């Protein structure tokens, strides 16, 4: 797969990701949602940390929330830069289409979430108890590098009590699937999944 095709894939994923995020941000208040189906909801939340809202400051009191956010954003930028170099390298060396495709969608997803972290803080007003506006007169809800990632895809597929015969967890309430995520997260997870499941095909040499 050529670099041009890889860039086209990245562009399409980024476009879908950002359109969905901007629409949610400018049409919903934080915490607001819509039940599309019983198993699929649109639920607007913002994530200022890593997966499941985890922050570096959760592990140590030596780092403030703002410092943890800045470190995370800078780490994401370094990581996506490394992925970009990897993508260019594998296309130049004409590696397998599977590998190039997987790296492309991982890069697109990572870049999509970086855009939120870097720019959304000063591009949009706050979403708490109001629908955000784009380029507000009084400035955004945060400074550059401190924006929150917009999530909206929620799949509460099953919720109930686990069978009593299960060891340790029997009879306890369990729900699947709790995390709320976005298109960029889907791209990253899919790309990593491809590299794991189709490992031999991706790294055929």
Image: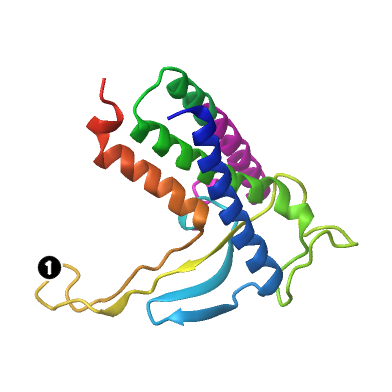
Q: Is residue 60 above or below residue 179?
A: above
Q: Residue at x 26, y 34 (%)?
A: 199
Q: How many marks?
A: 1
Q: Is residue 155 magenta?
A: no
Q: Nearer the viewer, residue 16 or 158?
A: 16
Left or right: residue 122 versus residue 64 is right
Residue sitting farthest toward the top: 93
Q: Residue at x 52, y 27 (%)?
A: 82
* Quadrant placement of the N terminus: top left
- The x and y percentages for residue 168 are 17, 67
- The x and y percentages for residue 85 are 52, 24
The residue wearing badge 1 is: 167
Q: Is residue 79 magenta?
A: yes
Question: Circle 1 — which element?
Answer: loop
Left or right: residue 190 versus residue 149 is left
Q: Nearer the viewer, residue 7 or 197?
A: 7
Left or right: residue 161 versus residue 114 is left
Residue sitting farthest toward the left: 165
- The x and y percentages for residue 192 are 36, 42
Q: Residue at x 53, y 49 (%)?
A: 13
- The x and y percentages for residue 114 are 61, 44
Q: Nearer the viewer, residue 42 or 58?
A: 42
Graded by Cα atoms within 10 Å as few (under 14), some (14 to 19) or many (20 or more), the crowding at tag 1 reads few
Q: Residue at x 66, y 66 (%)?
A: 23
Q: Is residue 166 above or below residue 85?
A: below
Examine the image and state in which quarter residue 148 appears.
bottom right
Magenta stretch: helix, strand or loop mostly: helix
Q: Nearer the viewer, residue 119 or 162?
A: 119
Residue range in magenta is 53-82
């Amino acid at each position: 797969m050529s670099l041009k095709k890889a860039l086209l894939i990245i562009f399409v994923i980024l476009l879908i990701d950002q359109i969905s995020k901007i629409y949610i941000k400018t049409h919903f208040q934080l915490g607001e949602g819509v039940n599309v189906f019983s198993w699929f909801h649109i639920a607007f939340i913002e994530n200022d940390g890593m997966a499941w809202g985890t922050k570096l400051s959760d592990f140590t009191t030596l780092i403030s929330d703002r410092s943890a956010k800045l470190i995370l954003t800078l780490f994401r930028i370094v990581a996506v830069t490394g992925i970009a170099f990897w993508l260019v390298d594998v296309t130049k060396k004409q590696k397998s289409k599977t590998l190039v495709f997987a790296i492309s969608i991982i890069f697109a997803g990572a870049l999509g979430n970086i855009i939120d972290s870097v720019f959304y803080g000063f591009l949009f007003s706050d979403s708490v108890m109001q629908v955000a506006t784009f380029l507000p007169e009084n400035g955004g809800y945060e400074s550059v590098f401190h924006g929150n990632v917009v999530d909206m895809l929620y799949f509460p597929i099953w919720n109930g009590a686990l069978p009593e015969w299960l060891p340790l967890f029997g009879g306890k309430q369990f729900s699947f699937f709790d995390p709320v995520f976005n298109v960029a997260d889907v791209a990253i997870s899919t790309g990593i999944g491809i590299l794991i499941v189709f490992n031999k095909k991706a790294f055929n040499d």
